[in-house]
Amino acid sequence: MARLSDPITVLKGVGPAKAKQFAALNIVTLEDLICHFPRGYEDRNQFVTIDKLQPDVPACFKAMVMNTPRTAHIRKGLDITKVQVADHTGRLNLTFFNAKYSAEQLHYGEEYIFYGAVSGDFIGYNMTNPVFESPDAPAVSTRRILPIYPLTAGLTNSALWKTIRQALEICPMPQEIIPEEIRRKYDILPAEKAYFAIHEPQTMQQAQAAKKRLIFEEFFVFSAGLSLMRAARAEKSCEIYQNVDLSGFYGALPFQLTGAQTKVIGQILEDFRRGTPMNRLVQGDVGSGKTMVAAAAGYCAVKNGYQVGLMAPTEILAEQHFQSLDGLLTPLGIRVGLLTGSMTPKQKSGVRKQIEDGELDFIIGTHALVSDQTKFCKLGLVITDEQHRFGVGQRSALSAKGEAPHLLVMSATPIPRTLALLLYGDLDVSILDELPPGRQTVDSFLVGESYRPRINAFIRKQVAEGHQCYVVCPAVEQTDGMSLKAATQWAQTLQNTVFPDLKIALLHGQMKGAEKEQVMSAFARGEADVLVATTVIEVGVDVPNATLMVIEDADRFGLSQLHQLRGRVGRESAKSYCILTTHNRNEQTIARLKALCKTSDGFAIAQEDLKLRGPGDFFGSRQSGLPAFRVASLGTDLDTLSTAQQASKDWIETYGTSDCPEASALRQRIRALFERCMYTMN
């Protein structure tokens, strides 16, 4: 027997070249191969007669060959083979393109089982390149439920299935991790049956049962991991904060906090008085005032003798936080510091010494905060901003620099509350659902290309009034046949042809980190009138002077992403605008974009986006902190997620400290899952 950890090259027919193709699907080991699950199935068990075949609907049928296949050489690279088949209900013409050898396996007067779809493009019935087998041959392409797999260039579905089948024959299945009583309670298949049935189901019911097990398993591992984290946190203790008087902080604010901000700060103060480490997620729409909530929490922590570490995903966001918090907290006697990767070694060394010696109270930085060289004197509160940019591993690494510090994570990406409670099962969830007074509503418009002259005139008008503009494109570079606006070429067009008298800047994700920071900082200083960019400006960019956001080919973005981009303007008192452009005339697409123009409620938009696009597009392909589920979908399987959460709680109560094989295997799977969740920033 082979081992699950063995490379796939132990299989027959998988050499170095084929292994590279599999690697493109993230398949390296036999376990990766067995866990490469079908994306769907074709039921080739059901037979129809020729007269019941429907255009463009694949089906299986049995028919006799009525003549000898004849091949015509049309031109170089194109051979056409024709043959006629029939059953008791009618005749059917079959056409094979460049498949002479295959088609000539059909023998006059013999019966075969075919699978394909008739075409309505010809006079009479015609079928192109059907698959076929003799009724006496093993059922490979017909008379079975055929799994359909995600593929890559050079790898056919048949070849992939045969390789998986070979692996199933020579190695054990992944170890069972769900106890029998939980499987019985929730009607879940055992692991071994499920892993075989997902690849070789005898019926569609078997395939569905196997899929149910594997969806449940993925959510069960995820939920159990979060439950273990929560249970471990509950066992930890920390000093109760005695001083929770924030009157000095409130008195220093030049404005009054919203009711939502006051409520969330109250929840944080309650956490500080519990004697167990806080683990709280603060969700707030664009401009809802999360930074002030973080400042209040940090003020309280420092007043109780602790240091605060605030980690931001980009240097420019870290610098913006530093500027605003330094101005607010320094007059209150709180020493604020900044630590970023672009600082000189001497600067970083000096700041790190101040942190370790306790000479800084509130330290703001990027991932430089989690490096081994950064040591805190008495870290009591960890804050991560833009939580979706960080994984569980990074926030844990920062927390490990203190003794059971409180944790506050903030996200400006609205997630429907029910989903947030399920996803962030290790966190308590607070919602900032109220905007500060004076915050401008951004007027949004959806237009076609015919409005281009008016868009350009409006950009010029905003610049003439002393403001700045963003232009966001869905692509970086133009490629052959691509009709989308590409940032690089569009920036050149605007600079050379449309606005030669204005300063146009370019920003995209393929630029080096230092170059991106330089461009963004220059734009923030007002050194450019228009910034043409990709979605790298989606979060963490605060340029109060920007009043116009133009989003090209807006149909290529999700609603939540468009809402985040729109949130880059309207950050001060000046009236701000967002213009969405699209060539797409699809009714559903237009309705979706118009819905965005009608509301500024990020949570309502997020709910609609999740429903329309599913979680993959909703969160983005690099959503960190979330596992890459192989089978489960956060868009369609939320009921199973809720069930798995309850099952994981049952497991914690019964097996949380057990050393039985299933419990040990589950802990191992949890560790592997959360290692995959760790996020490495660009």
Image (cartoon, rainbow, N blue to C red):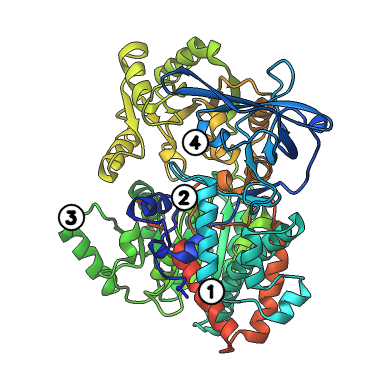
Q: Residue at x 49, y 34 (%)?
A: 569
The amino acid marked with disc number 1 is: Pro
Q: Say whether disc 4 or disc 3 marks the residue closer to the N-terminus.
A: 3
Say which of 12 and 443 sits in front: 12
- Say which of marks 3 and 1 sits in front: 1
Q: Say whether disc 4 or disc 1 marks the residue closer to the N-terminus.
A: 1
State the residue position of label 1: 172
Say which of 526 and 50 sits in front: 50
Pinpoint residue 228: horizontal percent, then vertical percent: 57, 77
State the residue position of label 4: 572
The amino acid marked with disc number 3 is: Thr
The amino acid marked with disc number 4 is: Glu
Q: Residue at x 53, y 74 (%)?
A: 172
Q: Say whether disc 2 or disc 3 marks the residue closer to the N-terminus.
A: 3
Pinpoint residue 185: horizontal percent, then vertical percent: 78, 75
State the residue position of label 3: 344
- Say which of marks 2 and 3 sits in front: 2
